[in-house]
Image (tube, rainbow, N blue to C red):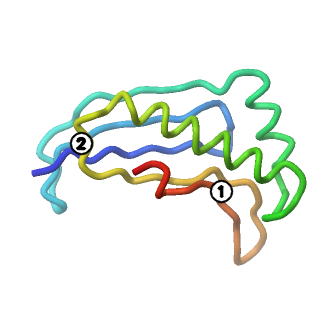
């Protein structure tokens, strides 16, 4: 059994959610703590400014750095996590493709 942490920031851009489970990879043996980190006014504004932009577009690098830092800060509150599932911040959708910004290696 391992402690697995799931984290996500949705398209509402209100903040980052995290929840812990105990699992063997096939079944959930138990639910652990959950936490939420809200995006502040300046943070939400930075993310909103990057919406609809593709990699290399205005504000995308800054939005990605913010998302990575927010997720990492929240994950630090779960030192027992042995595995982290992370959904990067979605910035743009188009039929057949989308772009999500984040760096899983930084979450590790």
At 68% from the left and 49% from the top, the residue drawn is: 64
User: Which quarter of the figure has residue 96?
Assistant: bottom right
Q: Quadrant of residue 94?
A: bottom right
* Relative depth, front residue between 15 and 77: 77
The one nearer the camera, 77 or 33, is 77
Q: Is residue 32 left or right of residue 16?
A: left
Name the secondary structure under disc 2.
strand
User: Which label was assigned to residue 21?
Assistant: 2
**Total numbered badges shown on the rendered structure:** 2
Q: Which residue is mark 1?
A: 101
97 sits to left or right of 5: right
Residue drawn at point x = 70 percent, y = 74 percent: 97
Image quadrant of residue 52?
bottom right
In the figure, 68 relative to 80: above or below? Answer: below
Q: Which percent across, then down, holds residue 15? A: 60, 31
Q: Which residue is rendered at x = 47% and y = 57% of the image? A: 105
Q: Position of residue 85 (x, y in %)?
A: 39, 53
Q: Dot 1, how many residues are within 10 Å of its Cα: few (below 14), some (14-19), or many (20+)?
A: many
Residue 57, placed above or below residue 50:
below
């Amino acid at each position: 059994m391992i402690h697995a942490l799931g984290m996500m920031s949705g398209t509402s851009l209100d903040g980052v959610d995290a929840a812990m489970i105990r699992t063997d990879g096939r079944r959930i043996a138990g639910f652990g703590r959950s936490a939420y980190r809200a995006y502040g006014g300046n943070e939400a504004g930075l993310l909103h400014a990057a919406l609809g932009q593709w990699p290399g577009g205005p504000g995308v690098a800054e939005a990605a750095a913010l998302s990575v830092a927010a997720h990492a800060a929240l994950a630090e509150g779960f030192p027992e996590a042995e595995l982290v599932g992370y959904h990067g911040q979605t910035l743009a959708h188009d039929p057949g493709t989308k772009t999500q910004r984040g760096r899983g290696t930084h979450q590790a």
